[in-house]
Image (cartoon, grey):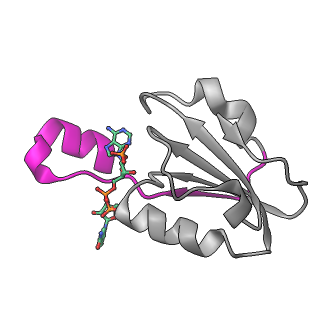
Amino acid sequence: MVESKKEQSGLRVAIIGASGAIGKEIVDHLKKDSRFSEVILLVRKQLDEWKPDDFIPKLTVILKENFDSFEDVKDHLVGVDAFLCTLGTRVKVGDELFIKVDY
Ligand SMILES: NC(=O)c1ccc[n+]([C@@H]2O[C@H](COP(=O)([O-])OP(=O)(O)OC[C@H]3O[C@@H](n4cnc5c(N)ncnc54)[C@H](OP(=O)(O)O)[C@@H]3O)[C@@H](O)[C@H]2O)c1
């Protein structure tokens, strides 16, 4: 986990799928938004563009190998004010995975 040391006060938002096209766009907006005190990214990989110093809110990046369960990270998510899901995949990955991720 990568966590910046900024103080917490205000809205907290968590995003699953932040490394995707839509998710990155949302993170770009959130990083400049002083109404939020913490932005929590649940992702499979850290992106170079997520630098804590570029964020007004505290940045917390939680790296997870698979998203079948959130039991291991639930303590970080308790009390978040918003939870955004921008997961997505493509039909070409096959029906089973497409339905699992998108639905
Ligand atoms: N892009 C558009 O213009 C657009 C327009 C309308 C609607 N949408 C919808 O918005 C949603 C997101 O689209 P997008 O274009 O942002 O998709 P994307 O660029 O393909 O991003 C997909 C995201 O989902 C994650 N993901 C995929 N499979 C996963 C898995 N098995 N486990 C954990 N994470 C997984 C990816 O993580 P990794 O980076 O680790 O792979 C990535 O963060 C989709 O439902 C799409 O239909 C998109």
Question: Is 8 left or right of 49, judged from the image as shown?
Answer: right
Identity of the residue drawn at 64% across and 30% down: 73
Above-or-below relation of 84 to 99: below
| Total marks placed | 0
Name which quarter of the figure residue 66 lies in: top left
Residue 16: % across, % down: 50, 49
Residue 70: % across, % down: 56, 31
Question: Is 13 left or right of 101, judged from the image as shown?
Answer: right
Residue 89 falls within the magenta-colored stretch: yes
Question: Is 11 left or right of 91, judged from the image as shown?
Answer: right
Residue 92 falls within the magenta-colored stretch: yes
Above-or-below relation of 35 to 16: below
Q: Ligand 1, what quadrant?
A: bottom left
- Closer to the camera in the image, 81 or 29: 29
- Closer to the camera in the image, 54 or 20: 54
Is residue 83 visible in this depiction of the protein?
Answer: yes
Q: Quadrant of the N terminus?
A: top right
Q: Which residues are magenta?
A: 79-103
Residue 79: % across, % down: 78, 47
Residue 27: % across, % down: 56, 65
Above-or-below relation of 47 to 27: above
- Closer to the camera in the image, 79 or 29: 29
Identity of the residue drawn at 77% across and 63% down: 57
Question: Is 21 left or right of 42, judged from the image as shown?
Answer: left
Farthest residue toward the top?
Answer: 72
Identity of the residue drawn at 74% across and 32% down: 75
Identity of the residue drawn at 46% across and 62% down: 23
Is residue 103 visible in this depiction of the protein?
Answer: no
